[in-house]
Image (spheres, rainbow, N blue to C red):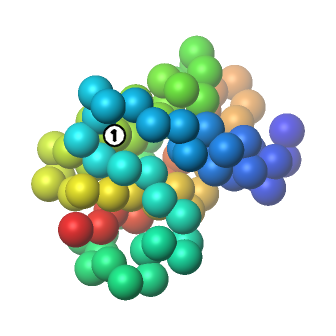
Amino acid sequence: MNIKSTVAALSVLSVLSFGAFAADSIGADQAQNRESLGTISVGGINNSPMDMRAELNKKAEEQGASAYRVIEARTGDNWHATAELYK
């Protein structure tokens, strides 16, 4: 799967709402009016995109972010993603 397909798949999955997570996954248009807090990365996840999303949520919450936007994602033997955090 190429990077664009992976990012598209993650975007679709990020639209789903899961109340257990404190940080929301947002799109580029929603990020325009928010203050950036930096970036986070997760990797070595070999189960599913949902596991990667859970790890992104966990790290975003630990950094005090209310939202994050996936800016890079790839797959191979393991999933990897980088996200920008927002207040």
Figure quadrant of residue 72: bottom right
> Residue 12 at x, y = what percent?
67, 44
Which residue is drawn at the image coordinates 43% and 74% (left, top)? 31
Identify which residue, 66 or 51, lies in the foreground: 66
Q: Residue 11 placed where, x, y %?
A: 64, 50
Residue sitting at 79 percent across and 55 percent down?
4
Q: Can residue 80 be seen in this view?
A: no
Q: Where is residue 20 in the image (x, y as percent from the top left)?
A: 28, 27
**Could one spot residue 52 in this view of the protein?**
yes
In the picture, measured across the screen, residue 54 lies left or right of residue 16, that is left
Residue type beneath disc 1: Asn
The answer to which image quadrant residue 77 occupies is top right
Residue furthest top as drawn: 47
Residue at x-position 74% and y-position 51%: 8
Q: In which quarter of the image is the C terminus?
A: bottom left
Badge 1: residue crowd in 10 Å (few <14, some 14–19, many ≥20):
many
Q: Which residue position is annotated with label 1? A: 57
Q: Quadrant of the N terminus?
A: top right
As helix, strand or loop, the secondary structure at mark 1 comes to: helix
> Where does residue 44 sit, x and y in percent of width and height?
51, 28
